[in-house]
Amino acid sequence: MEVAARETSRQRVVEAAADLLAREGRDAVTTRAVAAAAGVQAPAIYRWFGDKDGLLEAVAEYGYATFLAAKHADTRPQDPVEDLGTGWDLAVEFGLANPELYALMYGEPKRGTNSAAFQAGMRILLGRIHRLATSGRLRVDEDLAASLIHATARGAVLTWLSLPDDRRDPALLTAMREAMISAVTLDKPAVRDPGPAGAARALRALLPEQTTLSDAEQRLLGEWLDRLTTDRHKDC
């Protein structure tokens, strides 16, 4: 009972700090102001969060959880490229709707990145990327794709927020989105047939043209690729 009450009070402090941040900016988030807004004694904040930076870390985690709740993970999208664009749009829209919170979450490189909500959000993104890869539409490797997508969304929002109102042109966001999609995806699938068999056939066809592998390595890889395509025909 006591633990639950303490956790409820702690959450009330985090939400009060997030509300102050949204309404009045980061400078307004003082321990005194947050304590008054949450209806607790200031020493409680130090017990629960250590210091103001610890409180801000908790607010960032709250932001990641709020963002995660707004995400929709479609594990079978009709078009994985369109699904990628939709996810990017959602991230940008969240940032524009919550400027102070977004700046806290993403203005410092590693703030909140160890939180469960941040990691869950990254798994949704990695799922989108993996579906692009299995459909033959991914231009770069999956880790690089994740970095590019994350960097362009963050850069688009933080750049937008740094501009005066009269210089905020929606064309910036459109151009960033299209640049991201062009950098990460292919216009047509890299292989004709989805799955390992199609990829194996495509790689088998290109194998004689490469010079990185030795003759013995090429023969061994060729055997493996032949087995993948043969196994598929057996299943059929």
Image (cartoon, rainbow, N blue to C red):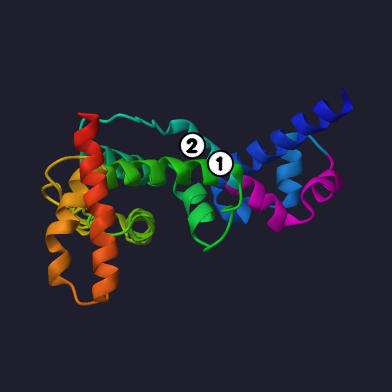
Q: Mark 1 belongs to which amino acid?
A: Ala
Horizontal side, residue 218 vs residue 149: left or right: left
**Which residue is drawn at the image coordinates 15% and 40% (left, top)?**
193
The answer to whether residue 143 is seen in the rendering is: yes
**Which residue is drawn at the image coordinates 35% and 61% (left, top)?**
144
SS class of the residue under badge 1?
helix
The answer to whether residue 177 is seen in the rendering is: no
Predominant secondary structure, magenta span: helix
Q: Quadrant of residue 97?
A: top left
* Stretch of the chain drawn in magenta: 41-60
- Pinpoint residue 13: horizontal percent, then vertical percent: 71, 39
Query: Which label belongs to residue 216?
Result: none
Q: Identify the residue at the far top of this view.
A: 1
Q: Look at mark 1 in the image and give the residue it sits on.
A: 117
| Category of crowding for the residue at label 2, using alpha-carbon neighbours closer than 10 angstroms: few (below 14), some (14–19), many (at least 20) | some
The image shows residue 204, relative to residue 86, as above or below, that is below
Q: Look at mark 2 in the image and give the residue it sits on.
A: 68
